[in-house]
Image (cartoon, helix red, strand yellow):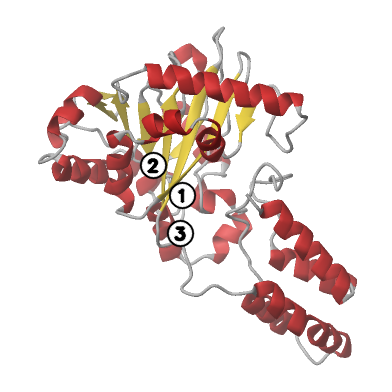
Amino acid sequence: MYISIEEFDRVCKQVVSLDDYPCAVAIEHNVVIYSGDQLRERMGDGASEIKAEFAACLKDGPGVFAISGAYADTSVIAKTTDLFLSIIGDERAAGVGKGDHFGANERIWNSKQKACERDPELFIDYYSNPLLALACQAWLGPFYQVTAQVNNVKPGSQAQSVHRDYHLGFQSADDVGRFPAHAQVMSQYLTLQGAIAHGDMPLESGPTHLLPFSQRYEPGYLAYRRPEFAAYFDRHKVQVPLKNGDMLFFNPALFHGAGTNAGDCDRLANLLQISSAFGRSMESLDTHAMISAVYSTLKDRQAEGTVTPDDVDNIIAAVADGYAFPTNLDSDPPIGGNAPETDQQLMRQALGAEWSLDRLMDALAARAERRRP
């Protein structure tokens, strides 16, 4: 892919017109703003029109929109906030937390399941929100799956560096470059990023920095790490304040990053990552059984020199899971990167160090246990 900051500038300098978004109520810094009350009134016969508008915004428009007053009853937000803080307190007391789970900020991995199990009635009130479902359906269609992580950002916490998000945003630059150009573009259609504000988020609290239209720059998963693109982001990024119970949705390919919390209050959000139904294989495979079957033979052939390094890599790809997700981020957190270790990496390590089959299978079993919900 040819990478050009001039082309990136041409893409990002576009301006949003409210005329193109008849269901919206305002445009703020190229972010499309919707009223939750008005959307609820238009639901039913108007749902298809709203979904088409959401999709157009995420794909060909600025790539980001907000819904003010997304919860008609903000007591649901208040009760869920109390529940999240209770979970944070319990996990801190239990010494839970690896990677970036707890530090100056506070995080709940898999906040969705934990909230569901602790208070099913409140969970129903929270996740039955029709506007949440509408946004998910607009970008992903039916059968999507919601995952969520709470992030509580403390005063004084510094801004994130610019990035794109899951899937390819969680891979190294070298790994991204191994994917063909069309797959890099396709990645953005598999996920929708969202956030629910649990408390007011004025600008000084550091709501997410956004670069509207940047999702339309096709080489962006390779480009965002480059210093000239980071500098461009710093010059042109925008923020919109959020109120308690507002929602924000954006294309995962949008250049973005959380802001510095220069205020005097926590900035607490439930971060949503909604996944397409299509990220699944057709058959269920026992990959550990296949690894067990081929490992000793492959190890022997490698020692004899009767297989090439490419042959070894191809067999590892054929029998072992090469992707770190989904996983249990409480027990299998990303340490030293964005993604935990994979079975392919373990198998490659084992062959390189000439592990016994038993040692490899024990390591794979331990990893499988860490991944269990």
**Is residue 244 visible to us here?**
no
Determine which quarter of the picture holds residue 300: bottom right
What is the spatial separation of the Cα atoms under label 2 and label 1, in whole angstroms? 8 Å
Picture coordinates of residue 251, whole percent (x, y): 38, 43
State the residue position of label 2: 214
Q: Outermost residue toward the top?
A: 264
Q: Which residue is mark 3?
A: 184
Q: Residue at x 62, y 30 (%)?
A: 107
Q: Which mark is residue 270?
A: none
68 lies left or right of 323? left
Looking at the image, is mark 2 or mark 1 earlier in the sequence? 2
SS at circle 2 = helix
> Contact, CB < 8 Å: mark 2 with mark 1?
yes
Mark 2 vs mark 3, CA separation in Å: 14 Å
Give amino acid for label 3.
Gln
Left or right, residue 310 beside residue 11 = right
Q: Select label 2 or label 3 by which is in front.
A: 3
Vertical position of residue 258 compared to residue 213: above or below: above
Residue at 56% x, 61% y is: 177
Q: x, y (%) of residue 238? A: 40, 25
Task: Name the residue rendered at 65%, 50% in the picture.
Answer: 339
